Image (spheres, rainbow, N blue to C red):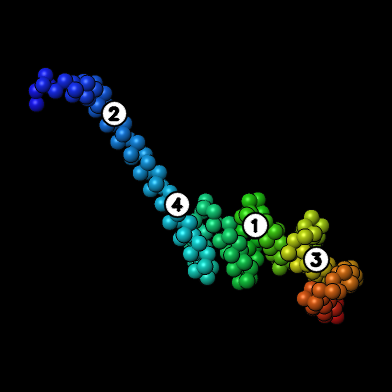
C-alpha cells in the first residue's frame, strides 16, 4: 500500500514504529496479571469449598488430622481444630486435646472463642488437675456471664471442687445454682444430675 496515497495512515504507522510494540507488550502483561488474579481467586474459592466439605465429611481422628494439615492457614482451620480437639477428648487423649485447645485459645475462630477456653478446663479436669480446672472454669464463668457455656463452666467447677476433696463447697455451689435456675427445667435437670454425681463421689 502506497502511504502517499493514504496520508491518513501515516500517523498510525509512525505511532506503531515508535510506541506500538511497547504498548502491545504492556497490554499483554496486564492481561496476564488480570488472568492470574482471577485464577488465584478461583483457587481460593476451590480451597474454601474443599475445606467446608472437610468440616462435614471428616469423622475419624485420622481424617481430621489430615484436614487440619491440609487447610493450615485457611479460615476453616480453627473449626477443624476444634473438632479434632473434641475427637481427642472423646477418645481419652486428654493431653492432645488440651494442646489443641491451648493453641486455639490464642487465636480462636470467629464465633467460637468460648469453646477452647471451656474445652481446656475440661481437659484439665480429665487429667486430674482439679485445682487448675476449677480455677479455669471459675475464671470463665466470671468473665462470660452471658455465654451459652456458662452453666457448663459452673457445673465443671463444682465437680472439680468435689473431686479435689471439697464436697461441701461443691454442694453449696450447686444448691445456689439450682435456686437461681429454678425456672429453667433443662438447667435444673443438669444441676440435679451433677448434685447426684457429687454425692455419690462423697460416699
Q: Which mark is residue 154?
A: 3
Measured as percent of width and height from the top left, residue 146 is found at 77, 60
For residue 90, above or below residue 117: below
Density class for disc 1 (Cα within 10 Å; few <14, some 14-19, many ≥20) is: few
Verify CB contact (< 8 Å) between mark 1 and mark 2: no
Density class for disc 2 (Cα within 10 Å; few <14, some 14-19, many ≥20) is: few
Disc 3, SS = helix
Residue at 22% over, 21% down: 11
Horizontally, is 82 left or right of 49 in the view? right
Residue at 49% over, 64% down: 54
Measured as percent of width and height from the top left, residue 174 is found at 86, 71
Q: How far is the residue under mark 2 from the one under mark 4?
A: 32 Å
Q: State which mark lies toward you, 3 or 4.
A: 4
Q: State which mark lies toward you, 2 or 4.
A: 2
Q: How far is the residue under mark 4 from the one under mark 1?
A: 22 Å
Instruction: Pick out the residue farthest to the left.
Output: 2
Foreground residue among 57 and 32? 32
Foreground residue among 130 and 38? 38
Residue 19 position by quadrant: top left
Q: How far is the residue under mark 1 from the one under mark 2?
A: 50 Å
Label 2 vs 4, first from the N-terminus: 2
Q: Which mark is residue 23?
A: 2
Residue beneath disc 4? 44
Measured as percent of width and height from the top left, residue 129 is found at 75, 63
Label 3 vs 1, first from the N-terminus: 1
Q: Is residue 115 visible?
A: yes
Residue 126 position by quadrant: bottom right
Measured as percent of width and height from the top left, residue 97 is found at 63, 63
Label 3 vs 4, first from the N-terminus: 4
Amino acid at each position: 500500500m502506497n502511504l502517499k496515497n493514504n496520508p491518513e495512515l501515516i500517523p498510525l504507522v509512525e505511532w506503531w514504529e515508535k510506541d506500538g510494540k511497547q504498548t502491545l507488550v504492556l497490554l499483554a502483561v496486564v492481561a496476564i496479571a488480570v488472568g492470574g488474579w482471577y485464577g488465584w481467586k478461583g483457587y481460593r474459592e476451590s480451597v474454601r469449598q474443599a475445606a467446608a466439605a472437610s468440616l462435614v465429611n471428616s469423622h475419624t481422628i485420622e481424617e481430621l488430622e489430615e484436614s487440619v494439615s491440609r487447610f493450615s492457614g485457611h479460615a476453616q482451620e480453627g473449626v477443624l481444630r476444634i473438632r479434632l480437639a473434641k475427637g481427642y477428648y472423646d477418645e481419652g487423649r486428654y493431653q492432645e486435646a488440651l494442646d489443641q485447645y491451648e493453641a486455639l485459645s490464642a487465636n480462636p475462630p470467629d464465633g467460637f472463642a468460648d469453646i477452647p477456653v471451656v474445652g481446656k478446663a475440661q481437659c484439665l479436669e480429665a487429667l486430674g488437675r482439679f485445682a487448675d480446672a476449677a480455677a479455669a472454669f471459675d475464671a470463665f464463668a466470671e468473665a462470660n456471664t452471658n455465654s451459652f457455656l456458662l452453666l457448663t463452666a459452673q457445673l465443671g467447677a463444682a465437680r472439680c471442687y468435689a473431686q479435689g476433696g471439697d464436697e461441701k463447697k461443691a454442694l453449696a455451689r450447686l444448691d445456689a445454682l439450682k435456686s437461681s435456675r429454678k425456672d429453667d427445667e433443662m438447667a435444673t435437670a443438669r444441676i440435679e444430675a451433677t448434685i447426684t454425681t457429687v454425692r455419690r463421689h462423697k460416699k
